[in-house]
Image (cartoon, rainbow, N blue to C red):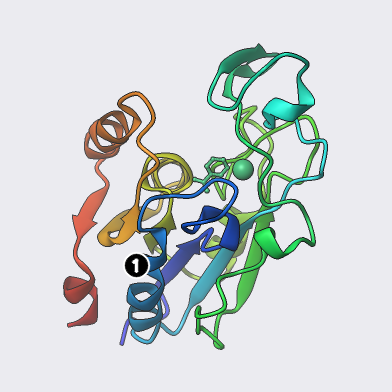
């Protein structure tokens, strides 16, 4: 069992990221049982949900003439445009029904401001608006965060990178993640995570 100074972040295991969902991640559903197993080894588990208003700026549908997976320039930088996904309160935004982590302490929602996306569970896409997670973890005495979920190259990577930037040790549980992999994004994400000193583990490493 992991102690008080370790927390598991279970990232965006929501219906819209599952096969058949609005922004499906290939084999994303395979992560759910692994996350359930991992979570049993942690006293401290935090779950995240991507949680957008219906007219969110990251949706292609919010920009006339734009299609999903195009990129646009926003005041805070480049934004990939996504299909409408994880709209607040919808079935697509709900956690996968097989996710079984009754002892999760905190559910942190992100991307709820219309004009700012947030892949990271720590800092929004403007790179300055904090979600409050770093303060929560610090006050809880957490030193190391283990990350799993969807998608490796977006929300998992940005969360792990921001965890490091906030001074936490970070580990990504590779076999408890799946990627979107848009135009080399997965390779880039691993390169950035390696450079930032983020460790990679397998679920079995966390469980022993
Ligand atoms: C995500 C794209 C858009 C993710 C969320 O959870 O990785 N990706 N919104
Ligand atoms: Zn999103």
Q: Going 78% across and 16% down the picture, which residue do you hit?
A: 64
Residue 113 lies, with reference to residue 110, above or below; the image says: above
- The picture quadrant for ligand 2 comes to top right
Depth order, front residue of 27/189: 27
Q: Position of residue 148 (x, y in %)?
A: 38, 61
**Mark 1, secondary structure of its residue:** helix
Depth order, front residue of 113/25: 25
Residue 36 figure quarter:
bottom left
Q: Position of residue 54 (x, y in %)?
A: 82, 43
The reply, left or right, for residue 10 in relation to residue 147 is right
The reply, left or right, for residue 32 in relation to residue 15 is left
Q: Which residue is mark 1?
A: 30
Residue 182 figure quarter:
top left
Q: Position of residue 109 (x, y in %)?
A: 68, 57
The reply, left or right, for residue 83 in relation to residue 204 is right
Q: Going 20% across and 61% down the picture, which residue do you hit?
A: 201
């Amino acid at each position: 069992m992991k102690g008080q100074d370790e927390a598991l972040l279970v990232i965006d295991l929501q219906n819209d990221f599952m096969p058949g969902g609005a922004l499906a991640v290939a084999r994303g559903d395979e992560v759910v049982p692994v996350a359930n197993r991992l979570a049993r080894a942690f006293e401290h588990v935090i779950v995240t949900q991507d949680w957008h208003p219906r007219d969110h700026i990251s949706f292609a549908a919010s920009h006339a003439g734009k299609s999903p997976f195009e990129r646009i320039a926003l005041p805070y930088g480049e934004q990939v445009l996504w299909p409408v996904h994880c709209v607040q309160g919808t079935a697509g935004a709900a956690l996968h029904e097989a996710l079984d982590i009754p002892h999760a302490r905190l559910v942190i929602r992100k991307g709820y401001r219309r004009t700012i996306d947030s892949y990271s569970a720590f800092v929004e896409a403007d790179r300055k608006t904090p979600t409050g997670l770093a303060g929560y973890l610090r006050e809880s005495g957490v030193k190391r965060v283990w990350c799993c979920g969807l998608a490796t190259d977006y929300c998992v990577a940005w969360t792990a990178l921001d965890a490091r930037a906030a001074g936490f040790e970070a580990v990504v549980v590779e076999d408890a993640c799946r990627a979107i992999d848009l135009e080399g994004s997965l390779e880039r994400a691993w390169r950035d995570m390696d450079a930032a000193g983020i460790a990679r583990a397998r679920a079995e490493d966390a469980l022993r």
